């Protein structure tokens, strides 16, 4: 992705946080006709392989899609893919600057990962992968899943293609006007008073030290 140096972030903890807090990723493969094929797939990041093997430096992503999705066959035949995560994002008004010779822009956090895909075939491994996603989003559902009839769970598992993606390269963009410190306080105030996506950016500005943390109420 286009990534100016001032917005390039190399803190692995920040990239991991973005992937965990915003798990719905865009998975891009190259189709048979050379045109990109894209699917929106929830992903689970973890530091180690599903099989306990040594993972690459940036960890692995676990996910699945419908067996009928053409991307499933592409990931099996062409394991290289691109996975993109979009974190909080919002418009930024030039009004945060004291001078008028400014233009509007957009603030955002994003992660882009190059991956090598490994299809998860055995039934028990697919079940284990699903439990990782359940643990992320609704841990209490694990009990309900275990109590469902085997005929039903097997049919559900047979209807998906599950995969583990080893991250071979990782880029993280944190575009929060770091190169314009004179406007950061005004930008933070504007975002803190805005809608939920803008408020999320205000919290990120606090978390990475661009502005002091907001005082605790009460």
Image (tube, rainbow, N blue to C red):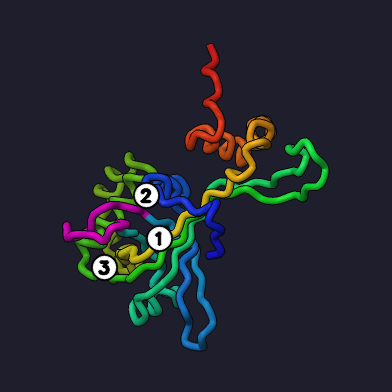
> In the drawing, what numbered circle is on residue 170?
1
Element assignment for label 1: strand
Give yes or no for contact between labels 2 and 1 (Cβ–Cβ under 8 Å): yes
State which quadrant residue 179 falls in.
Answer: top right
Q: CA distance from mark 2 to mark 1?
A: 9 Å
Q: What is the span of residues highlighted in magenta in the rendered image?
A: 44-59
Mark yes or no: residue 36 visible: yes
In the orientation shown, which residue stands out farthest toward the right? Answer: 100
Across and down, in percent, residue 170 comes to 40, 60
Residue pointed to by mark 3: 120
Up the image or down, 27 lies above or below 175; here it is: below
Element assignment for label 2: helix
Across and down, in percent, residue 192 comes to 63, 31
Q: Residues within 10 Å of mark 1 (few under 14, many from 20)?
A: some
User: Which of the two residues, 10 or 40, is positioned nearer the viewer here?
Assistant: 10
Residue pictured at 69% horizontal, 47% vertical: 91
Say whether disc 3 or disc 2 marks the residue closer to the N-terminus: 2
The kind of secondary structure the magenta stretch mainly shows is loop
Say whether disc 2 or disc 1 marks the residue closer to the N-terminus: 2
Q: CA distance from mark 1 to mark 3?
A: 23 Å
Q: Residues within 10 Å of mark 3 (few under 14, many from 20)?
A: many
Residue pictured at 42% horizontal, 50% vertical: 15
Residue pointed to by mark 2: 12
Up the image or down, 167 lies above or below 76; here it is: above
Element assignment for label 3: strand
Give yes or no for contact between labels 1 and 3 (Cβ–Cβ under 8 Å): no
Mark yes or no: residue 159 visible: no
């Amino acid at each position: 992705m286009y990534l100016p140096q001032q917005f390039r972030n190399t803190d692995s903890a920040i990239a991991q946080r973005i992937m965990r807090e915003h798990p719905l990723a865009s998975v891009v493969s190259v189709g048979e006709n050379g045109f990109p094929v894209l699917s929106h797939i929830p992903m689970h990041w973890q530091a180690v392989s599903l099989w306990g093997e040594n993972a690459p430096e940036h960890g692995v992503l676990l996910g699945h899609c419908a067996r009928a999705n053409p991307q499933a066959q592409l990931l099996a035949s062409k394991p290289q893919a691109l996975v993109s995560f979009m974190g909080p994002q919002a418009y930024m008004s030039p009004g945060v600057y004291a001078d008028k010779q400014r233009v509007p822009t957009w603030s955002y956090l994003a992660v882009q990962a190059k991956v090598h895909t490994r299809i998860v075939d055995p039934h028990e491994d697919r079940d284990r992968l699903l439990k990782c996603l359940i643990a992320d989003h609704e841990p209490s559902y694990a009990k309900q899943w275990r109590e469902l009839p085997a005929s039903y769970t097997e049919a559900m598992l047979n209807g998906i293609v599950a995969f583990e993606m080893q991250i071979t390269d990782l880029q993280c963009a944190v575009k929060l006007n770091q190169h314009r410190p004179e406007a950061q306080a005004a930008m933070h105030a504007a975002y803190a008073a805005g809608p939920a996506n803008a408020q999320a950016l205000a919290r990120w500005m606090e978390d990475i030290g661009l502005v002091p943390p907001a005082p605790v109420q009460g």
